C-alpha cells in the first residue's frame, strides 16, 4: 500500500507477481492467466534509489517476477466506472543491457507501454522502476492488465497495485 495514500476503502490490490507468500501489504500472486507462464526470483540486490521516494514495494517484490509469452491479471470487486491508479513494479533481473527485453502492456485493452524496456527505463539491470497509469473499472467492476510479447523476449512484472 503506497505510503502517500492516507486511507483505502476495500477496493485496492497490492501483490507480488509470481510470489507465493505475502510481504507486508503486498499479498501473494493474484490468479494470473496466460500462456507459457512461469515465476522466478533472485537473491541479488536491487537498486531502489530511483524509486526511494515513490512509495516502492518491499525489496523482495522486485526480486521476484511473473513472466510468460502472454499473461494477464483481471482484478475484480472494484466500483464500476470508478477511476483507479494502476502502478506496475519492475526490475530486470536477467539482462543488464538495454534492448534485450521489450514487451507491451495494456490496461483494459488499451496499450499503455509499447516495447517497454525495463533496463532502458530504470537505467540499469537490477534497478527498480515503477510505471503509473490511470484506469476506469469496467461495468462489471474489473480492471484487466495484459502483458504481451514485443520486439524482444517475453514480458515480465514484479508487482501490481491498484488503488
Image: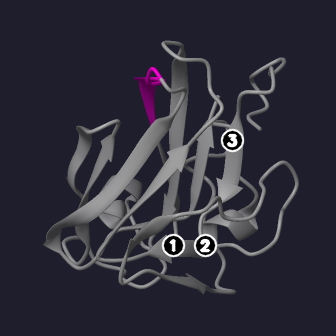
Vertically, is 36 above or below 128?
below
- Single out the residue that lies furthest toward the front: 140
Q: What span is colored magenta in the figure?
A: 132-139
Q: Position of residue 63 (x, y in %)?
A: 64, 74
Q: Distance between the residues labelled 3 and 1?
A: 16 Å
Quadrant of the rendered image containing residue 8: top right
Report the disc number at residue 18.
2
Quadrant of the rendered image containing residue 85: top right
| 138 magenta-colored | yes
Q: Where is residue 62 in the image (x, y as percent from the top left)?
A: 62, 66
Q: Badge 3 is on which residue?
A: 13
Say what secondary structure mark 1 lies in.
strand
The mark nearer the N terminus, 3 or 1, is 3
Report the disc number at residue 66.
1
Say what secondary structure mark 2 lies in.
loop
| 83 magenta-colored | no
Q: How is the rendered protein coloured?
A: one colour
Amino acid at each position: 500500500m503506497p505510503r502517500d495514500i492516507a486511507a483505502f476503502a476495500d477496493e485496492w490490490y497490492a501483490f507480488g507477481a509470481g510470489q507465493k507468500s505475502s510481504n507486508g501489504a503486498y499479498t501473494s500472486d493474484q490468479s494470473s492467466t496466460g500462456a507459457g507462464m512461469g515465476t522466478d526470483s533472485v537473491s541479488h540486490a536491487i537498486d531502489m534509489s530511483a524509486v526511494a521516494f515513490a512509495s516502492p514495494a518491499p525489496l523482495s517484490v522486485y526480486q521476484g517476477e511473473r513472466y510468460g509469452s502472454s499473461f494477464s491479471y483481471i482484478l475484480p470487486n472494484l466500483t464500476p466506472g470508478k477511476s483507479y491508479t494502476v502502478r506496475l513494479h519492475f526490475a530486470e533481473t536477467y539482462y543488464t543491457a538495454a534492448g534485450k527485453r521489450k514487451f507491451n502492456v495494456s490496461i483494459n485493452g488499451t496499450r499503455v507501454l509499447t516495447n517497454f524496456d525495463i533496463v532502458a527505463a530504470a537505467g540499469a539491470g537490477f534497478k527498480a522502476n515503477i510505471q503509473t497509469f490511470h484506469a476506469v473499472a469496467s461495468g462489471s467492476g474489473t480492471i484487466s492488465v495484459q502483458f504481451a510479447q514485443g520486439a524482444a523476449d517475453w514480458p515480465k512484472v514484479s508487482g501490481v497495485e491498484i488503488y
